[in-house]
Image (cartoon, rainbow, N blue to C red):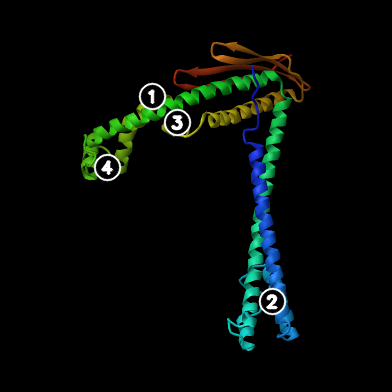
Amino acid sequence: MKLYIKAVTNISDLEAKIAKKKADKDKKLAWIDKKEANIVKKLDLLSTVLDSATYDRLVAYLEYLKNNRDYRIPEDIYVNTWQIARAGGWSYDSKEGKALYSIDDDAKSIYNSKEAIKEIDQVIDNYESKIATIRSKDSEIDRIPDCLKDFMNDIVARWDEYDIDLRDKSRPYYRELQEKADEILYEGNPTRSYMESDNKLKAMYPNIERSWNRTKAFEEEYIYAPFRKAMGQSVQYCSSLWDMSDDKIHAENEKAGKQLILDLLKRVTKITGPVTDWSGLYVTQGNMGAVLNGVVIGEDANARVESIVASGPVQRPHIRTLVKPVRS
């Protein structure tokens, strides 16, 4: 049997997202450099028209703004740029006034950019953590015996077949049930008023007082209950498949299959400790599909694995696996 185990979340997709975030960060850094250069240029101008004490205080104020965004700036740092402009007799349109207001805005912009970079770095860290987790799980899968991979692949293939068939059948059936329900409720008149429809529901469900509850009861009786009976699944489950491609369904099932095997490994090693011999574990094909049976030898103990695949005409195949210690 072909082994098609791979990372469900495509690592290359995450790496592309990381590259985009790094490009965004580079833009922010370039923006900060631009604003820093602008502040230096404007301060050079103001240094010629401000006394040294006011100038030094302005520089300290700008440094504080570039690194903090407090509602209450310390008194020994706070500078009222409007008062400085007024004291110098500078209007907003004057060269000095424009320089003063510009560097104030630039300092705040630098702070915002630095905060955005912190968020970008956090997102990058999260993506890199996901990549590490995927590679770790893939490494775990690579180390397990082929019989477990074969077992997983068999059930994933059955899940794929079931979900694709359910997707293709359930959507038109749901629409059919909706149309029949509308015919009952609206009696062939799509413009029928809400009051008329609710009166019909009152006659159908005289013991239910609330309008919303009558509607829910009607939908349950004429849509959801017959849907579950025919499809073996809820509308919610089926509707989650309707917009999924075959490849997407496979990816989701592969993710679940991989987790199933990793959980099985944990149950086995909880009994055996480090595994020394997998050769006693084997897969056989029965009428219901692949089954996994046998004994796993470990440093601490041995474990017996017994599994079956259960399913029905309208039931998703599922695995029942027992893991028990082997008594000596």
- Distance between mark 3 and mark 1 Cα atoms: 13 Å
- Distance between mark 1 and mark 2 Cα atoms: 75 Å
Observer able to see residue 210:
no
- What's under tag 3, amino acid-wise? Cys
Q: Position of residue 241 (x, y in %)?
A: 47, 32
The one nearer the camera, 61 or 307, is 61
Mark 2 / mark 3, whichever is N-terminal: 2
Q: Quick check: marks 4 and 1 in contact, CB under 8 Å? A: no
Nearer to us of marks 4 and 1 is: 1
| Circle 4 residue | 209
The one nearer the camera, 292 or 285, is 285
Q: Say above or below: 95 vs 66.
A: below
Mark 3 / mark 1, whichever is N-terminal: 1
**Numbered circle sitting on residue 229:** 1
Nearer to us of marks 3 and 1 is: 3
| Circle 2 residue | 42
Mark 4 / mark 3, whichever is N-terminal: 4
Q: Say above or below: 127 vs 142.
A: below
Residue at figure coordinates x 62%, y 84% from the top left: 85
Q: Is residue 204 left or right of residue 41?
A: left
| Circle 3 residue | 238
Q: Residues within 10 Å of mark 2 (few under 14, many from 20)?
A: some
- What's under tag 2, amino acid-wise? Lys
